[in-house]
Amino acid sequence: MSTRIETEGSSTASTKRSYGPLAGPTRWIDDRIGLAGLAKKQMRKVFPEHWSFMLGEIALYSFVVLLLSGVFLSLWFDPSMVEVEYQGAYAPWRGVHMSTAYASSLDLSFEVRGGLLMRQIHHWAATLFLAAMLVHMLRVFFTGAYRKPRETNWLVGLALLQLGIVEGFAGYSLPDDLLSGTGLRIAEGLMRSIPVVGTYISFFVFGGEFPGSDFIPRIYVAHVLLIPGILLGLITFHMLLLVYNKHTQWPGPGRTNDNVVGYPLLPVYMAKAGGFFFVVFGVTALMGALFQINPVWAFGPYDPSKVTAGSQPDWYMGWLDGALRMMPALEFTVFDWTFSLNVFLPGVALMGLLFGVLAAYPFVEQWVTGDKREHHLLQRPRNAPTRTAFGVAGITAYGLLWISGGNDIIATTFGVDFYTITRTLRILIFVAPVLAFIVTKRICIGLQRQSAETVLHGRESGIIMRSPDGAYSERHVPLAPEAAYALTAHDRPDVAALPPATDHNGVAAPHNRVQHARARLSRFWYADDRQKPTADELEQAHAHGHDDEPAPELDSAQEFQGVNELGLPRRH
């Protein structure tokens, strides 16, 4: 057998190989850019598999649907505030004067083939986009996926959520119908409530007195060009950080901080992701076809002298509307400036406070716990009781604000006094989150104790034994190694000790107050936690015979592939 060696610049040709039609252009590009090696490495990058990881994918694919449907709508929508007399297909509004923006919205709904379907797909995709982002960030929060080195990605996610809310509000304001105009009137009031400069901001945004003639064209440019461009850039940055920092994974056998167990991007994960995109697109299209949303023809054109009875914003703005309704009247005047705190505090300051706290939380937790390590394994919510309790308390407050946003609908539907609902919610907004925090933390600690007892003594078998002295007890079955690993694959946090008040020379220690505050917060964070069993505790459990009891015999009907219902490995 002969071997042919070809060196650089050699004129001899090796055995000819057949290439596909794209081989020539691809090789030409690679010779000049050299991305083949990098692309090959990234195409083989491993991603873990878990259903909760698909929440972020739903948000991503909803954004793609938004872009596609938005391009279609932009071809027919006219964002002009010029007044016209409507003579279109929708008979109830013929002869009525309205803005060109509202008239083009009606034309899109009734005269453009497929226009109403695309409008509803676009609106449902926006709702799904924000919902998926919110639930995805809750998953990140409750599992500790924001910890080092992913603090930057957490901040990027918060920016995406804020921009998504602004983009959604801008989108449903464009048709210039009575409902969206009511929302814009509220937004204008929020701007004016900003002390000293509020009026100037309102005049700048609306081009004069509300509603003006410039706002819809301006917000159209922001909605279809500026904000989507920023969102696209942030999503790209978010994905690059995901690839660079590698994906988090749930703890389990063979999974450590130094590896990723899953499937490669190409071909397995890419095929699954592609199929999931079409599932998301199909569900969104089905919702757009079957479920009506934002029927602008039912509201009529915007008139500043009118307000839609029972008007409700989209769900992601409902909590803000609820805060405005819940806030008591609080307004005063200093010189010639009016300070409307009943609008500014719930409408502007609350949003800044919310996202400020969320942005600072990873760094505050890192300072309190003193944990500067990198984390690539997720935490079960029960193993971080304080964080989980904070999250549930926040969800409780959000839900109460959301309910307050519909207090008029609740009052008329159930025949309850409107002011009674409002007063009750004002009390609950301070009481309910605290109760939710306490109850959630106790539940998490109880689940920690249950997990520790399960690791130490095994699972209950359902078999009752009677001792010679007549006492009854239940036989426990050893826990499967895989299950025991999953229950104990987390760190054992240390509670920071109070620092000494003075140094060895008797001089007051510097920064003592800060260290005392950190120690007290650390005790609040971890003091009540039930830590996972130690090696000594496991040895004592074995010494008492809890884990050495033989497993009960099972017939063939009780066995199945994997681990049976008693936690025993399957028989061979």
Image (cartoon, helix red, strand yellow):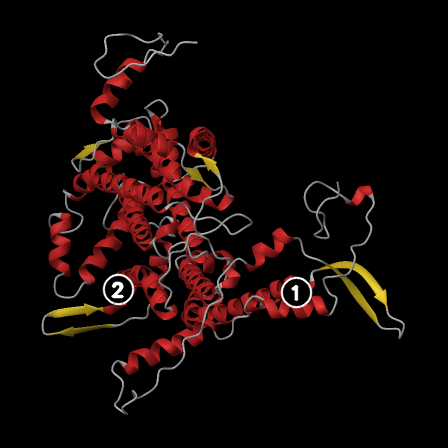
Which quadrant of the figure has residue 301?
Answer: top left
Decide which of tag 1 and tag 2 comes sooner along the chain: 2
The label number, if any, that marks residue 456 in the structure image: 1
Q: Secondary structure at mark 2?
A: helix
Instruction: Give the answer, above or below, for where 411 lies relative to 231.
Output: below
Could you tell me the amino acid type at mark 1?
Leu
Callout 2 amino acid: Ala
Q: Quadrant of residue 281?
A: top left
Q: Is residue 553 visible?
A: yes
Q: Which is more toward the observer, 537 or 52?
A: 537
Instruction: Give the side of residue 61 with respect to residue 382, left or right.
Output: left
* Residue 102, quarter of the rendered image: top left
Visible residue check, residue 312? no
Q: Position of residue 31 (x, y in %)?
A: 23, 21
Locate residue 60, reporting x and y percent: 37, 39
For residue 106, side relative to residue 533 (left or right): left
Separation of disc 1 and disc 2 at Cα? 50 Å
Q: Which residue is mark 2?
A: 349
Quick one: label 2, few (<14), some, or many (20+) residues within 10 Å? few
Location of the C terminus (image quadrant): top right
- Residue sitting farthest toward the front: 1
Relative image position of residue 475 (x, y in whole percent): 78, 62
For the N terminus, the image quarter is top left
Q: Residue at x 16, y 73 (%)?
A: 333
